Structure formats: C-alpha cells, structure tokens
Amino acid sequence: MSTDTTPSASTTDVPASPRVEELLASLTLEEKLAQLVGLWEGKGGDGEGGDVAPMQDAMQSEDAEFESFAARGLGQLTRPFGTAPVDPVAGARTLAARQRWLVESTRPGIPALVHEECLTGLAAWKATTFPAPLTWGATFHPELVEEMGAAIGESMRSLGVHQGLAPVLDVVRDARWGRVEECIAEDPYVVGTVATAYVRGVQSTGVVATLKHFVGYSNSRAGRNLAPVHAGPREVADVLLPPFEMAVLDGGVDSVMNSYAEVDGVPVAADASLLTDLLRGEWGFTGTVVADYFAIAFLQSLHGVAGDPGDAAAQALAAGIDVELPTGTAYLEPLAARVRDGLTDEALVDRALRRVLAQKERLGLLDATFDPDAVGEVDLDPPAHRDLARRIAEEGVVLLSNDGVLPLDPAAERRVAVVGPNADEVPALFGCYSFANHVLAQHPGVELGLDAPSLLAALRGELTGATTSYARGCDVDTADVSGIAAAVEEAQGADVVVAVLGDRAGLFGRGTSGEGCDAESLDLPGVQRELLEALLDTGRPVVAVLLTGRPYAVDWALERCAAVVQAFFPGQEGAGAVAGVLSGRVNPSGRLPVSLPRSVGAQPYSYLHPKLGAASSVSNIDTKPVRPFGFGLSYTTFERSDLRVAQTEVPTDGALQVSVTVRNTGDRAGADVVQLYASDPVASVTRPITQLLGYARVELEAGQAAEVVLDVPTTRVAFTDRSMTRVVEPGALELRVGPSCADVELTAQVELTGAAHPVTTADRRVVGVDVVPA
C-alpha cells in the first residue's frame, strides 16, 4: 500500500535545546536511525528459555553482537538485567563498560538509554518483588503506591537503568483476559489516580516511567490477548483514555508505549490521531513514544496494513512512534532505504530523534561518564523496600466472606490442615511480570535470590499454638485427582482447614494467568473446585485463600466456606500478609478493585454499565456479580453518616463540596475506604447506573470518627455527548455513599446548572481529599 508520511503542522514539537539541535545536525542518516532503536542481547531466535515477548522467535532471528550492532551508536539497551539471571554488581559493571564504549568508540559518542520491566518491582534477579497491580488497586491508597514507585526507581537508578516499562493503565473490561493481573482496577478513576501516583514515585528518582498500553488493549474480543478491539469512540473517550490523560497531565509522565491492539480496524501503532493528534496535540505530551515489542513489524505480519518492513516503519514513524523496541529491524535499513528513495521525509526521522535526544539530555546522559571499576555494592532488596512490599500486601488483602471463624487465635491449641496447590509454592505469590515467573522460571536450578516464605511456612510461624499439617491435594491446572484423598484425610483430623487455591502466573500458555494466558472459563483452574468441595464435605470449617491474578466465579465457595480471602499475587511479603489476616494480626482493609463475577457468561462486565447491562427478566443470564466493585469486609465495623453537600446547585464548570462522617464502631483499629458515587438519571446518552466520583482511605482507632471532605470537580461526571464532545451537562445528580458500588447507605441530591460545559485539559480532573478527625 502507499502511505503518505509527510509531516503536518500538528506534529510540530516544542523546539529542543541548542545542544540537541547541534547534535542532531551532526549525525548522518544511519547514525540518526541508530538512536531510534534498541538492542536486545541474549534473546535470539533459538527460543532458549522460552519466549518472554509475543512471537519472539519469529521476530528476532539472531543475537546481535553489541559492538557491530552499535557501531553507529545506539538508542536503547533492552533489559540487560531482566533477560536472564544477572548478578546485580557484575551486571552494573558490564553495563557501565558498554556505555563507556558507546561514548568513546562511536562517532556520535551518545550513551544508550537503558530500560527494564518494573511492574511488580524491578524485574531483575534478587530485586524486591512487590504485589501485582490489582493489589495496588485493592489498597485504594495512591500515596503508598507512590512510595513503592520511588523505591522501584531507586533500584533501577542504582544499576544505571533509566526507564521502566510500567505502569499498566488498561481498564479491566473482561475477567477472562490473561493480563487482568497487570491492571489496577475496572474503574478508570482508580486506575488513573493509582497509576499517576506510581508515575510520580518512579520519576521522582530521575527514572522515566512508561504508560502501557495506549490504548484499548484490555478491551479485546472474548478476553483474548492481542485480539481486535471493537470499542466505539465514546467508550474509548470515556472509559479507556481518562487514566492516560491523568498520568500525562497530572503525573508528567515522560514515556508512553503503544497498544498492540487494532481499534475498530486501525492498529494503534499506525494511528496518528491517537499517538500524535491526541497525545501531543491535545494533551501536550513532550516525552517519547516507544513501540511495544515488535509492534512495528506486526503492522505487516499481524495487522496486514503494511506491505513490507519499510512500509511498517514509515507508518509507525509518521503516526508518532519514536523508538523501535526491543531491537532494531524496521527502523534501520528498511527505513533508511525509504528515506534515501524519497518515500519518507527525513524530517520525520528528525522529529523522533529530537524527542529522543531531548529525553537523554533531561536524564543527564549527554554528559554522563562511566567507570565500571567505580560500581560498588548494590542491594536490590533492602529492608525498607521489603517493608513497603509488606504494607501494600497487607492493605490489599480482601476478606470476601466470614462466618466468624476468622480471625484464628494464633495462640490457640488447635489442629490446622493447610491444603492446596498454592500453599507451599512461593511463585504462587508472584505475578507474571515478576522476575521469578517471567524469567527465572525458564532457568531451572537458579535460586530465587529472595527471602520469601510460602504461605504454609508463614502460617506455621503465625499460628504458634497450632499443630499444622499439610497436603497438596492437586495441581493448579492438571486433571490429576490422586492427591485429593490424602488432603481429605488431613482435613478430617483438623479443627480448621485452610485451602490455598488459585493461579500460577506465566507467559503464553505456561500459566493460568498472565500475558497470553487467557481463560475460557472462570472456574478455578484444574480440579481445584473438586478438591475444595471434597474438603467442605468433611464438615470441618474451611477457610479458602485465593492467590490469583483475576477474579474467579466462586459463588459456590462463598456460600459453603467458613471464610474466603482474596489476594491478588501479593508479592514476596504476601505470605506474611495473608497469614496476618488469618490470625487477626492484620485487620483486612482491601476492597475489590474488580467485580467478582457470577459466571463466565456475564463477561465482558463492568460495574460501569447502563440499565441495559444489568440483570434483566428478558435474559436468562444473571450479570449481577457475587461481590461488587469496592466490597471488602473487616474485623471491625464502620458507620457512615451525615452526608452533606455545601451547595445543592452547582454550575457545570464548578465543583461539589461533599462531606461525610465515618466512625469505627468496633473494638479494634481498622481502615475504611469511603466511596462516593453518583447516579445521572437523565442524560443525552446512556450513563452508568452508578459511577465512582472519589474515595478516601481512612485509618481509625476503635471508637474514633473522622469527617471526610471531598472537593469533586464536575468533570468527574463528564461524558462524550451525541456530537462527540466531552461535556458536563446540566441536570440532577444523586450522590451516594456506601461500602461498595452496590450498597447505598446515604444519598444526597445536587443540581448542575447553566449551559453544558465543554471539558478541556485546563479543567481539573482529580478529587481533593481532606480527612479531619471528628
């Protein structure tokens, strides 16, 4: 096909510094293109160790020798610590030597920008493994996530890494999608606030964060990885884009990664309306856009919109992708040939290069010196980072049901049978993008390098008065039932049974959750239901602990189990966090960041559905979730009262001043998550039955009360109208407060007045929160 790649006025960037302009002018075409690609050493086409990127074997034919590949310079080094187990100190010295060679032995003399994955902590051997992002969402605690981001940034910076490929801002739309575990929530505002906090934390250390995956990736057909996305422009604008807008405008993020998706037939990697007109033209983004791994080549091989690699490169470059990752294929000779033949304007190359060099200048790379001998000791798992991992894990555990069996008195003399495939498996605590499951699983025999107990070990340490026995019962995902009888025998002799079930994170079918591990069913994998039902049939009280990457349809377990505890891959400190919840040392305070589905037949599902998305007498499928978004139990009780609105009439371009009192009415300290929702009963387009406006996590001692004051910009109820303009319309709103999206305890009425207000980037997006002791 023929593609017009002439730069337009809308693609003009803010002028770069004189130094960048001078450097750009000094480079040959080949040297320019070398700055727009990465190099991935140690990941060639032999598939050794298993793929860690889509179709890696097909897309990268051989390992490139560093010095020959980088003879004209190099834009990025891809995952020098996250490709194989590398000793941190030795790896940092090797990296410094690579950088010194680039400075001293190439004509441009420009260091490479180094990137790594960092979704659950720096994905490097012996680095702290934090909880998966669904746990971040379950905390409803952005400030804590910001601290974690800063810790991760510190680790990266200590090694000489400049860019982290996180956070993921995809809004959960279908529980079957394997990458649900990488997401934060099904609510765009929770995603946006938590992800923006992560960005601020990482970038506070001088490391670049990268938003993934812009945009639409999670809305794929049938929950399949890398499948077409058929989302209307209103859904894209009102649900999928807001988190990215927040992270760009409020977080100042310096890098964005394109989505693999094709949205309504147009691949994002070739969509200038998204990557340039919206991202840069409307939002004012000034950083770099990097390609998701092999996304440019996929324009030819998967999407069929390019005839050859040069055509793919030209389309991606014109659309706004500045850097080809993980390595250079399309942006080197194929793109050079098009420029030389006059098919692609070199001004497009200069546009991307200007952004890349400006980013390197901001990072101090243009003046950096490198001395391998100066690299000292590096601790990627210091006590402060482990403490952060513990706090996030503890705050993110969700108690789904409890008939009073929990908490278990740790000093009580009782027999506890710990059963299940995840009870004594440390990797069961980690997500797909943890180093343990992403890389180390492909290197059998290499030690974990972290002090991370299994839940069985943590329970034995926690329940000091108990006699604890163990039986595996079954595997996570096989049909082998041979171990169930032994597990039942252990249960029959116990006073209480703890059944630890769930997922095994992996890649491309090597797990039950993770990239390329999509689900055909939302039943627990393998024969885990059969195991749990056999345990329940013993008549002993059973506490089910779910270590998963997605919500499963477990209504039957909620009905029969004495208690059910949900933890979304809680990380290396997760076993202690879950054990602490079971013993009562930790008062559970996590809230569901995703709805707990009733069945796979209700997917795709979001609590943000209009009336027609609710359960109905004209369909035999009940879409009502078993546990709603925002739900979570505690060992104490909370009373919410005195919902007040400062003004019952507010202009459409104004803000709602809302306050509510929350009191801990129980006998122990705990944390409540105050959730403010709104219902818009009449609008020009259909609206969700209810929508989260704002939230506040509130820590209260027994008997203590606090007033939560929320300063809510009216943009929180904005939507795209029939003319495709994002507006705040006048009309009535009902404000709601309760312990979840489905449980309404308090209501108040407010009227938005005046003309419809067109929303711009100048409007405030974030709710102000103030918690005042009562």
Image: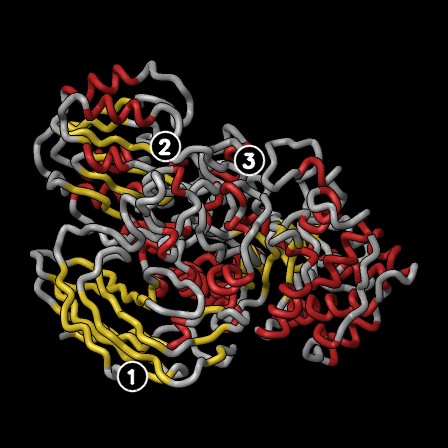
Residue beneath label 3, please? 508
Quarter location, residue 500: top left
Whole-percent x and y of residue 318?
A: 75, 63
User: Tag 1: residue type?
Assistant: Glu
Question: Where 486 falls versus 59 (above or below)?
Answer: above
Q: Is residue 422 above or below residue 185?
A: above
Cα distance in 3D space between marks 3 and 2 = 20 Å
**Displayed quadrant of residue 508:** top right
Please give the label number shown on residue 649.
Answer: 1
Q: Residue at x 23, y 46 (%)?
A: 399
Amino acid on which disc 3 is placed: Phe
In the rendered image, residue 518, in percent from the top left (x then y), is placed at: 49, 37
Q: Residues within 10 Å of mark 3 (few under 14, many from 20)?
A: many
Q: Is residue 226 visible?
A: yes
The mark found on residue 523 in the picture is 2
Q: Residue at x 22, y 19 (%)?
A: 488
Q: CA distance from mark 1 to mark 2?
A: 48 Å
Spot occupied by residue 176 in the image (x, y as percentages of width and height): 45, 40
